[in-house]
Image (tube, coloured by chain):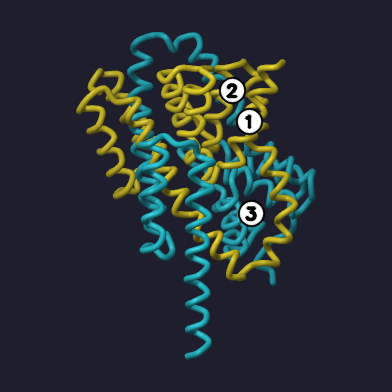
Chain colours: A cyan, B yellow
Amino acid sequence: MTDVSTPPSLRQLFTGFSRVGLSGFGGVLPWARRMLVEEERWLSAQEFNTLLGMCQFLPGPNVVNLAVCVGSRYHGGKGAWSAALGLMLGPFLIAMLLGLLYDLYGQLPQIQSVLRGVSLVGAGLLIATGWKMARNLKFPRITLPFTLLGFIGVAILRWPLPLVMLGLASLCIAWIYRTLQAQAARGETS
Amino acid sequence: MILLLELFLQFTLLALVAFGGASALLPEIHRVVVDQHHWINDATFMQLFAIAQAAPGPNVLIVSLVGWEIAGVPGAVVATLGMCLPMSLVISLMMPVWNRMEGKTWQQAVQFGVAPLAVGLVLSSGFLIGQSSQQGGSGIALVVLSTALARYTALHPLWLIALGGVCGGLGWV
């Protein structure tokens, strides 16, 4: 099928992901999808969903993981480095510049007030993101209580994350596994 | 040198539990760099988060900024690499296996089972950032307002960030 265009070169991987990194404010995932699926057509929509599924369930920064997946698919290790460096380099340099400015002027009360306003909005953006993610959860009657328990453990009780993840995630995965199996069994008998 | 090594190892460890990406990891980063190691204080952490929000790029840049604040450019490089490198290696090894397992029951169970905790972690991040930034009712009101705007309108996040900057600059929150 010609749904997907010719494989990108190393340079194209670098520039394509640079564009994604530099245009993404407040999360770059939508931009990554636009570049990969709609503009460059390196991936079909279906391939994008499969790769993203893996990158989102694995720990680590999701978009960096995605860049590594796409890059290594075409050019192995070199491709992975080109894509990930493309994604990170521009934003990293900008962040360093802002860090420098922060060290110079961050103590000014006006700057501190502006940054406090921005981080309050940032908190709102995070809560809205979590809210949207929650609406897409599969098996909500099983999974939503785990969301709540995770929140209580991490945000209220301030337990260490590895502990919370190990305990709750394994329990939740086991529960869903049993539910899926039960579903499959019912499907076979009917 | 010791500090750089420690930074690298610390962020490598953090990366291994970063289910849901860097936004979900904020409470744990805060716990490690502020409460445990006292590398930076609470107010600085909150302000670096604000800068990362206002800058373009992946959310993981908060890690670069924290590294920068602790040990300059080498610190930023080391922290970012610690965060990105280990899982990138695992992924390039795992990708072929994962594609072959597509559709298997246990694979679906893992995928569906980790997601609700990622949601809980992202919500925790928002809650903790809001908690350490607010200084009273108007701050809480701004968090609620921006949550609602981001959830129910298609407004570009940059507008909301600008709104926050203006409210802060005018001393309203």
Q: Which SS class for mark 3?
A: loop
In the orientation shown, which residue stands out farthest toward the left?
B137
Q: CA distance from mark 3 to mark 2?
A: 34 Å
Q: Identify residue type, mark 2.
A: Gly
Q: Which mark is residue B67?
A: 2
Q: Residue at x 33, y 18 (%)?
A: A113
Circle 2 crowding by C-alpha within 10 Å: few under 14, some 14–19, many from 20: many
Q: Nearer the viewer, residue A30 or A103?
A: A103
Distance between the Cα atoms at labels 3 and 1?
Answer: 28 Å
Residue B42 sits in quarter? top left
Label 1 sits on residue: B80
- The chain letter for the residue carrying disc 2 is B
Picture coordinates of residue B73 (x, y %)?
64, 18
- Residue A14's quadrant in the figure? top right
User: Which comes sooner in the sequence, label 1 or label 2?
Assistant: 2
Residue A40 disc label = 3
The answer to whether the residues at label 3 and label 2 have Cβ atoms under 8 Å apart is: no
Identify the element where label 1 is drawn: helix
Image quadrant holding the N terminus of chain A, namely: bottom right
Residue drawn 40% across and 18% down?
B43
Q: Are circles 1 and 2 on residues that touch, CB within 8 Å?
A: yes
Q: Is residue A103 left or right of residue A55?
A: left
Where's residue A172, x and y in %? 48, 58
Disc 3: host chain: A
User: Of tags 3 and 1, which is closer to the observer?
Assistant: 1
Q: Label 1 crowding class (10 Å Cα cut-off): few <14, some 14-19, many 20+?
A: many
Query: Residue A111 lies in what quarter of the image?
Result: top left
**Disc 3 residue type?**
Glu
Residue A56 image offset from top left, x and y in percent:
55, 51
Circle 3 packing at 10 Å, graded few (<14), some (14-19), many (20+), is some
C-alpha separation, residue under disc 1 versus residue under disc 2: 8 Å
Badge nearest the viewer, 3 or 2? 2
